[in-house]
Image (cartoon, rainbow, N blue to C red):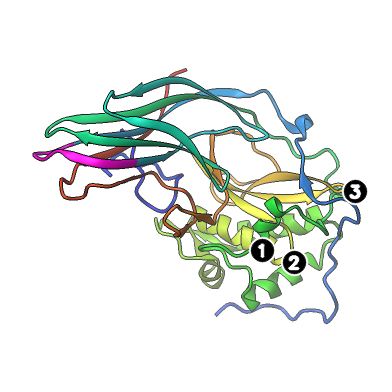
Amino acid sequence: MISRNRHSLSRFIIRPVVFLFAALLLCPVPMVHAQLGAGSASRDLSRLGEPVTQKWQVGVIISAGNQAAAGLKVMIPVPTDWPEQVVSLVEDDISDSVRNVGFLNLDGVKCMTANVPKINAHGAAKILQTYKVKIPPIAPPANPESLLVPDKLDKDVKQYLNSSPMIDHRPGAIKKLVAELAGTQTSAWRQVESFYNWIIENVATTADEDCQGSSTTLRKKAGNDEDKINLFIAFCRAHKVPARIVWGEDTEYAEFFLVDENGSGSWFPCQPGINPEFGKLSEPSAVQQKGDNFKLPNGERRRFVPESVTGDKRSQPEIIFVRRRISN
């Protein structure tokens, strides 16, 4: 059984539940903007390769101890369609004691929900679903030099210009470095690529499991793979380029958003951490979630939507979240 109980969805664990900058020119940083369109996302099928098919089983197994457990509510993020991904439910394995199985859309994340009215002492309930996921490799754009920073954005994309947990683009140190890097480039694509290159060349990789935030990563010039992704996203947002985290089943990476001369926008992958790649994705992995600032039903803000079981705490049932790849 696979359980995730740290902040990152991408770390799979088998267990129960003073930096100096060069002087900047006193002139505006060139920012190559689009003049037309609303900055909405489109699906560029030409960049998608032959999809690979994976099967993933997700859910939870709840076991009661010496006391019965009652009034449990379950929420489990499940795979869903994205422009580059096609998902189908192929199998349910759900105990008879489970009621009201349904789905909830939480800021774009598809979540399976269910109620477990009662589990008798020493009994168990399982809620497992198996999904088939088709996900292709993604090629870089044919003409990246023509892409632009959007002037106008749909609200669904504009939200990815805002700060989020562990990602803050507002500190002066980040803005200064971004201005310096972007000022040496003539196209939006090369400006964003310069952010990626700086991280690859200047930020050492650590084995720390916990994230430290984008500002600390910049100050230390060191961080884990997720820290590097956070810093890249902070750089993009400081340059008015929407960016977000993609939480995959096997990995995580960043996406940034640019538009063509007609204002039609696309998301492009970037992996500044393990197996670095810019503008393409050679080894696709099933996408779980996209984003890094979700509002949970209890009002809490989180970088991702976690699995949860709430309700009867007195009986202290054993809860094992399942998220595993199974043979095709």
Pointer 2 local density, CA inside 10 Å: few below 14, some 14–19, many at least 20:
many
Q: Quadrant of the N terminus?
A: top left
Circle 2: residue type:
Leu
In the displayed structure, would residue 22 be above or below residue 157? Answer: below
**Where residue 264 sits: x, y (%)?**
83, 44
Task: Choose mark 3 or mark 1, whichever is in front.
Answer: 3
Numbered disc 1: secondary structure: helix
With 275 as the anchor, is 206 left or right in this view?
Answer: left
- Label 2 sits on a secondary structure element that is helix
Q: Residue 5's x, y, as percent? A: 34, 48
Q: CA distance from mark 1 to mark 2?
A: 10 Å
Q: Where is mark 3, residue-wise?
A: 261
* Amino acid type, label 3: Glu
Viewer-side residue, 298 vs 77: 298
Question: In this rendering, would 285 be left or right of 256?
Answer: left
Q: Compared to 15, does 101 lie above or below?
A: above
Residue contact between numbered discs 1 and 2, judged by CB atoms under 8 Å: yes
The residue at 60%/32% (across/down) is 81
Q: Which residue is mark 2?
A: 181
